Image (cartoon, grey):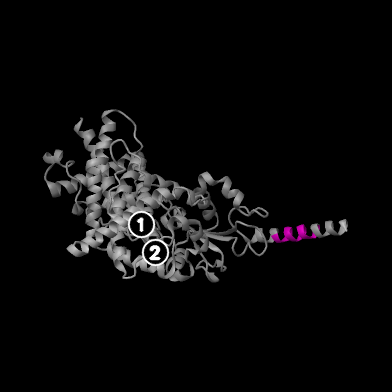
């Protein structure tokens, strides 16, 4: 009996080993280990994960397949992951066969407690309704004006005074944290019409912002516990929603209309939505508008400190625009008193190019994934079975020589400017995927550029002017 068990075990191990050797030869990319698949390598490279994925993609021509569970019957289905940055594949997934590549159950289960059925965690009709409702608002001049007011107020009354105070005291300041606070206040104003005032002297702690940070971090680590941070943001948003309901009832009687996204969703449908649904709607837009812009601006300021010629060009462009709109250099002292206006911001082509180049090299969302509904073949010939997942590396997409040339790793804003007429070049959205692409392309792209150009341009110019004025 014991001998037969040993022989059976040997037979199973031998069969598995033969299967493992065969699938190892079939899969490209990082090494696949028995049972654990490519997880050991992913864990080992976690501190440089996006660089590691990019290296594997370069070695494999832009697409590779691996498995996170090297077990028969799973390795080619639920355990199979196709990783790509090929623009042809991205267009196929994000546009041509859009319905075949939803967010999927795995993604939705990981983020459900935080994002619920919000626009970034939903598919089908639920996603489509939120998309259409939000799209109507993002295309209005009213929302652009509201964003402009929020950003300009934050820069003039909070952001700059905090920087000036730190400079006067010769104290270091965490610029990324400061920008994060500023963008958080801005997006909260747009999302539900309230000023959270986290970017203020003394850098006060905000319970809603703190709870939101903890919940987001826990979700990304796939260790989300419903109790972690939920009381903070749920309680805060519950009060906001109840207050807004009362305000809307009063406004309907007076004929007054609010333009924040929460109010629009509450007024959109005759059949009222639950408070939980509205909370998730708001949280989804805060997540989209807060971290993305702040991360991009942090990289932007770091890059221009490393490339002083780019900084000089940005300053020259701003000076040129201000001379045209506000007068000669003799009035330069008044240039810093008022924030940049819409018309002035629209003229800053080189600044937009520098910001776009920043996002190409350091996208705020470096990776995204999709679930495969039905068997399919990608344009490069890769077969993807139903039930597997496809991960597309936005970070790698901006660092491929086949897409961006031999100088793809260099910071060159000029690649975004036409040498013929000096206008901004809108590169194909499947090559430059920092704002996603296809039906799910970022609705707030123009507002994001408005915010980044206002903060980035104002920050660079104010720093230059202070240095110039002091001799």
Reply above or below: 429 against 412: below
Vertical side of 26 occupied by 211: above or below = above
Quadrant containing the C terminus in the rendered view: top left
Closer to the chain start, of discs 1 and 2, is 1
Q: Secondary structure at mark 1?
A: helix
Residue 254 is drawn in which quadrant?
A: bottom left
> Magenta stretch: residue 285 in it?
no
Side (left or right) of 61 relative to 31: left
Give the CA separation, mark 1 to mark 2.
18 Å
- Residue 69 visible in the snapshot: yes
Residue 403 position within the rendered picture, expressed as x and y whole percent measured from the top left: 43, 58
Which residue is painted at 51% across and 66% down in the image?
Answer: 380
Figure quadrant of the N terminus? bottom right
Q: Between residue 191 and residue 161, name the one nearer to us.
A: 191
Residues in magenta, as a range: 10-19
The image position of residue 339, as x and y in percent, is 20, 46
Residue occupied by mark 2: 440
Which mark's residue is nearer the viewer, 1 or 2? 1
Magenta stretch: helix, strand or loop mostly: helix
Secondary structure, mark 2, is: helix
Q: Which residue is mark 1?
A: 282
Asked whether 17 falls inside the magenta stretch, the response is yes
Residue 404 location in percent, x, y? 41, 55
In screen coordinates, is 220 left or right of 312?
right
Counting other residues with Cα less than 10 Å from the Cα at mark 2, is it few (<14), some (14-19), or many (20 or more)? some
């Amino acid at each position: 009996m014991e001998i037969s068990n040993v022989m059976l075990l040997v037979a199973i191990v031998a069969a598995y080993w033969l299967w493992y050797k065969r699938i190892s030869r079939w899969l490209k990319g990082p090494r696949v280990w028995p049972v654990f698949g490519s997880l050991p390598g992913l864990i080992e490279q976690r501190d440089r994960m996006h660089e590691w994925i990019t290296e594997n993609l370069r070695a494999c021509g832009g697409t590779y397949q691996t498995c996170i569970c090297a077990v028969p019957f799973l390795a080619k289905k639920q355990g199979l992951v196709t990783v790509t940055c090929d623009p042809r594949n991205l267009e196929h997934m994000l546009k041509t066969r859009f319905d075949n590549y939803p967010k999927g159950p795995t993604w939705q289960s990981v983020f459900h407690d935080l994002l619920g059925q919000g626009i970034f965690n939903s598919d089908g009709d639920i996603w489509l309704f939120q998309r259409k409702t939000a799209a109507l608002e993002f295309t209005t001049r009213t929302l652009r004006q509201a964003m402009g007011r929020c950003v300009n107020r934050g820069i003039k009354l909070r952001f700059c005074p905090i920087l000036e105070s730190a400079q006067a005291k010769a104290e270091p300041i965490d610029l990324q944290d400061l920008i994060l606070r500023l963008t958080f206040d801005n997006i909260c104003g747009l999302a539900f019409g309230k000023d959270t005032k986290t970017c203020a002297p003394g850098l006060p702690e905000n319970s809603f912002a703190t709870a939101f940070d903890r919940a987001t971090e826990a979700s990304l680590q796939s260790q989300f516990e419903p109790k972690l941070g939920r009381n903070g943001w749920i309680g805060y948003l519950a009060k906001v929603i109840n207050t807004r309901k009362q305000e809307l009832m009063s406004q309907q009687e007076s004929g007054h209309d609010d333009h924040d996204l929460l109010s629009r969703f509450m007024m959109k449908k005759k059949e009222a939505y639950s408070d939980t649904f509205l909370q998730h709607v708001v949280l989804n837009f805060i997540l989209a508008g807060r971290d993305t812009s702040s991360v991009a601006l942090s990289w932007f300021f770091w890059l221009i400190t490393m490339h002083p010629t780019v900084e000089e060009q940005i300053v020259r462009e701003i000076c040129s625009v201000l001379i045209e709109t506000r007068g000669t250099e003799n009035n330069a002292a008044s240039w810093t008193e008022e924030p940049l206006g819409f018309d002035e911001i629209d003229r800053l082509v080189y600044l937009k190019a520098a910001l776009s180049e920043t996002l190409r090299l350091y996208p705020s969302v470096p990776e995204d994934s999709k679930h495969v509904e039905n068997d399919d073949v990608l344009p490069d010939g890769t077969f993807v079975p139903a039930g597997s997942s496809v991960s597309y590396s936005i970070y790698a997409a901006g660092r491929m020589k086949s897409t961006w040339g031999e100088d793809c790793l260099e910071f060159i804003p000029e690649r975004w400017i036409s040498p013929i007429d000096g206008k901004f070049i809108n590169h194909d959205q499947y090559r430059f995927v920092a704002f996603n692409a296809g039906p799910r392309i970022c609705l707030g792209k123009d507002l994001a550029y408005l915010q980044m150009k206002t903060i980035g341009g104002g920050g660079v110019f104010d720093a230059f002017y202070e240095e110039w004025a002091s001799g």
